[in-house]
Amino acid sequence: MSINWRALGPLFIIISIGAWLRLDHIGSLPPGLYRDEAFYGLDAAAILQGRWALYFAANNGREPLFMYWLAVFIAVFGRTVEAVRSASAVIGILTIPAIYFAGRWLFSARVGMLSAAALAVNFWHLAISRVAYRAITLPLLLCLAMGCAAWAAQSNGQMRRGRMIAAGVLFGLTFYTYTSAQMLLPFGVAFLIVMMAANRGAGLRPASNLQSAMLPFCAGLVAAVAPLGVWLIRHPDLFFNRAGQVSILNPIINHGDFWGTLLGNIGKAASMFAAQGDRIWRHNLSLRPVFDGLVTPFFLIGVVVVLWRVWQWLRTGPNPQHGKAALVLLLWLSVFLVPTILAEDTPHYLRAIGALPAACMVLAIGLEASLAWLSKQGYLMGLYFFTRPFRGWVTPPALVATFVLGISLIGTRADYFDNYVKNPLTSYWLESHNVALAQIQQTPPTTQLYLDQRLANDNPALQFLAPQAYAPSTQIIAEGKAIVITPTQPALIIFDPNHDWATLRNALPHPAQFNAMLGALAQGDKDPQPRRAFVGISVAPITATPVSNNIAQFEGGIELMAASTLTQNPAAVTLIWRTQQPIREDYAVFVHVLRSGNLIAQHDGSPAYGLFPMPTWQVGDQIVDLHPLMAQSNGNTPTAALDLHPSTDQILVGIYRRSDGQRLTIISENNKTLRDSVMIFPTK
């Protein structure tokens, strides 16, 4: 294989841009760790412990290649989101030179380069590269296999046989990537049928070159597929279980109208490239088409060019240039759309991932054909002035292609980093609450952990990121089961707030200091609105004698023991309360920030996010009460920062009765009524 050294410079730039897009903030963007990603992480961790497998049966079954690749990253970076997502991102980056390799040998170096650039800036591939789905391995292996087969087809003798064996092995390895790789079988059959029909129509014997190449190819293919094939023959139920769940053959999915569902899905799959893409936030900026408005026309032109080349080749025989390669590309694109057409939620970017490299090559062919026509017509002559200093390296068509794909790059980056990862639905659908739940599990060894059974069960992200949560020392809180919390040991209780926690609250030890921590919001695919995923209660024994110089003593025995102000990201006030006697009524606390007498921020609410209403307080307990400050000018928008000045600003804290808004007064040491609020800033 001759190396085009001049092409390496632009290719390196394209790969660098693709790597930048795929690795930038890979550990935190997009937020979360979806359950499928976590299952892959658990499988990879099991591999590192010596539990090897040809097929991983959990979570509806998974092909193994990505798990073994992921195990390398976990071995180096640990059980982290960064390790899992980086494994996928690196595969996404490697696919860029791989598609160049395929395009180079199927068509030309120019098509290969344009295909690499189209893939590098494509939102679909970027989004799937930044989450750890095993489907990302399929485009890489397909490009390598297709490129190797095309490379071998242009060789002779012993070298050709070796390359065909390598192509067969690569095609075989695709079956270890993702379920959609099964479409290689109908793809190969369709290609052979069309090839034989074309040869017969042209009055030719079946191509001897094709026959001589099939034996080494099949040898490599069988050698690679055999281990997995033997395993799947013994366990067909695991392999086909998931397909049956989502297939439109299922009456539950097609609603008794298979043909109508099929035709509708074909239309949705065809329109996903230009009109309406995947709706699922885990795969896509919901409904965003595969190509943006600038490059879509070139994709459509590419479809026409490919169809024309196939028609010319079938009509006149093997002479038209690139006719056979166009047939391969057309079948590649069409056949690998079948998995999403035959399943629910069409278009589905994971099931259709095998078609993505072909779509990028079609775009490249359309862009090349358009620029060739414009150049031939003389419309690009004016650009020669700009390319003269780079003569031999940059041509006017290359300059236009760079501009078009550069604008696409800008749009893709804006859509991904500004619109996609910042949208709350992305966070919800990728289950970011489980990452937050895992982080809160990082407790000191002296802290006893109590974990709600509802949160512990079927939570692969928690199992992967925080295996210590399942240690024997962790107490699992079963619904309706009484627990005993040691009053002399610090404890962290994590529970699902969407259920009554009165039984758990009654089990809390006394006296103790209680600090409530709100967990992240979550929203399942079918939830009408977000919900609080979990709440943490920190329990600290009180061992020291309480101080007597409190900030304020309110009527009814309510004491404000301490107060602190956070002025940044977001601004908040933390209060610590206790009571000298039982409280019969549910009061609310207010925090007001005044500037020159005008209210600029505030927060009202029950103490500790309403988890510890005052009637539940017991004598001797301390309640830590956080109040995020909301800007008055923006309604309920949290105040990001407060630049407080003692000369003009005040923070007042008070308590009022919910029923009529009547404020409680502050009592002096000699039981005199003073005022209805206490100033905590500036301090005296």
Image (cartoon, rainbow, N blue to C red):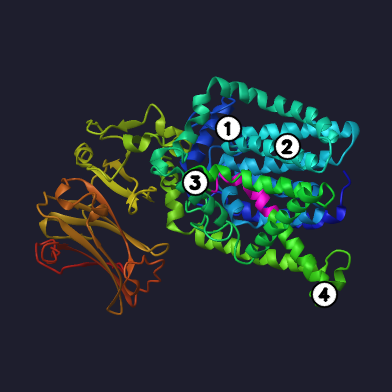
In the rendered structure, find residue 192 and report the number of the disc placed on it: 2
Q: Earlier in the sequence, mark 3 or mark 2?
A: 2
Disc 2 or 4, which lies upstream in sequence?
2
Of callouts 1 and 4, which one flags the residue occurring earlier in the amino acid sequence?
A: 1
User: Which-is-in-front pick, marks 3 and 1?
Assistant: 3
Most frequent secondary structure within the magenta stretch: helix
Label 4 crowd bin: few (<14), some (14–19), many (20+), radius 10 Å:
few
Q: Is residue 353 magenta?
A: yes
Secondary structure beneath disc 4? loop
Quadrant of the rendering where the N terminus is positioned: top right
Circle 3 SS class: helix
Residue occupying the point 57% across, 52% down: 127
* In front: label 3 or label 4: 3
Q: Which residues are magenta?
A: 349-361
Question: In the image, residue 592 lies at what x, y percent?
Answer: 27, 69
Which residue is denoted by mark 4 in the rendering?
Answer: 378
Please state which amino acid type lies under the numbered disc 2.
Answer: Leu
Secondary element type, mark 2: helix
Helix, strand or loop at disc 1? Answer: loop
